[in-house]
Image (cartoon, grey):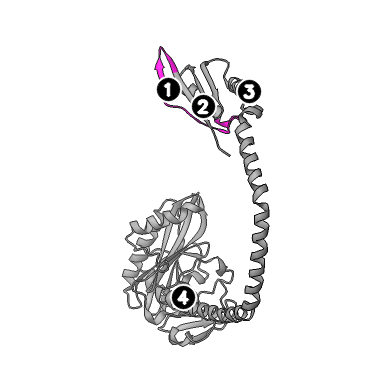
Amino acid sequence: MTASSFLMPDAEPSWRLWKSISSGNPETVDSPAECRDAGKAMVVGLPATACRTVGLILPSVDATLLASMIEAQLERRGIPIEHKPTPNFAWHNLGLASGQTLASVDVLSNPFPENLAVHHAANYTAALRMMQLPANDLTVVEEQGQLVMAVSSIGKLWHSHIIGSVDTNVADLARELEIAKMTFEAQDGFASLRGVTLVGERLGLMAGPLKKYTALPIATVTELQPNRTLKLEAFQKLLPSTVFAAQAAVARRKQYASIGVLLVILYAVLFACSWWYLSSLQSKATALKEEVEKTNGPASEIRSTEQRWRSLAPAIESQRYPMVVLSNVTALMPPSGVSLKRFESKPTEVEISGDARDAQTATQFLEDLKKHPKLSRFNWSMPVPSMKEKAASFKIQGKLEQP
């Protein structure tokens, strides 16, 4: 995924537009609608009101099983999963912690706000996923009038949810933070949290009053910095259905236009070459017919000869001689435990009857026949052995595979 700009929600009901992840001075825009005609692919960072981020701690399993485990965990939490026309979620593997996998899942809200649909967007993701978060802290940030609490893993977003508005009572906020800290730390495999980081000037003013209601260490920062080490090409595709449908329609129109141009060119070439092609085709057909008539006799003789050699194969192929087959069979018999009573060899079939110490020994003998390089040309089969006088009587049949 190649993106040339990044749209991020601001603390106020506005947005910040970065021309690139490395630019330091973003532009302020009132709404994503102002970017719809920018004509450049962009990544849209969504506020928590439009994109829910769920942190999961999963057993360390093969990567092919991780996706199904994540979907099962989301369904257990009552989060609707959609796959068509496009998935409404995207997950990120944040690595291992205490032998377990930390996964972070972004889930689009349903219904998705139409005012956030940027049809030329390359991808959508949670806004905080594109920021560098304090490690081992509960981070509280203001997103368009809402207070969002985020938890990171090595500075990367793991979990976030809305905990209130800017008018939330300080005592309620302190209680929410303490409950969140205990909840996260109680999860098996989750590291301990140091304290709380408040982001922004307005939240920074709440640090003093907040300390009266909680013993958690509180730090403040003016703003979060973009994570300039992000590898956006590794992100899974996450597009709202309206954006996906708009992009699919544009792609179809381009495809139809390309097909139309190619058809016009093709028809012109075919029309110009049709007379020459038809005349040359007629002459070739006549020549080929004459050649076929000349080869009918020799071809018939070759087919007849092939059939005669095929019928003689059992008599001239040494590996199908009964004594050779019997020799190969007896070479597979263990020193004890298997005895043969009857061996019958036909041109295309072999039957072996005998007794074995037990059914397992007879089954192993069958498997050895199947694996033998010179006997594997037969399809070997055996009914369930019958037990008689503490011995398993078996009958094995091998049918020659037809070439």
Q: Amino acid at mark 3?
A: Val
Q: Which residues are magenta?
A: 370-392
In the depicted view, which residue is nearer to us: 145 or 17?
Answer: 17
Asked whether the viewer can see residue 373, the reply is no
Q: Neighbour class for label 1 at 10 Å: few (<14), some, many (≥20)? A: many
Q: Secondary structure at mark 3?
A: helix
Q: Which mark is residue 235?
A: none
Q: Which residue is mark 2?
A: 366
Q: Which mark is residue 324?
A: 3
Please give the label number shown on residue 248: 4
Q: Quadrant of residue 112?
A: bottom left
Against 330, residue 229 (above or below) is below
Mark 4 and mark 2 lie on one chain; the one further toward the N terminus is 4
Which class describes the residues within 10 Å of circle 4: few (<14), some (14-19), or many (20+)?
few
Is residue 373 on the magenta stretch?
yes
Q: Position of residue 53 (x, y in %)?
A: 41, 66
| Pointer 4 or 1: first along the chain | 4
Q: Which residue is mark 1?
A: 385
Q: Earlier in the sequence, mark 4 or mark 3?
A: 4
Q: Quadrant of the C terminus?
A: top right
Give the residue type that dot 1 points to.
Pro
Which residue appears at 54% of the width and 83% of the height?
26
Could you classify mark 2 by the number of other residues whose Cα lies within 10 Å: few (under 14), some (14-19), or many (20 or more)? some
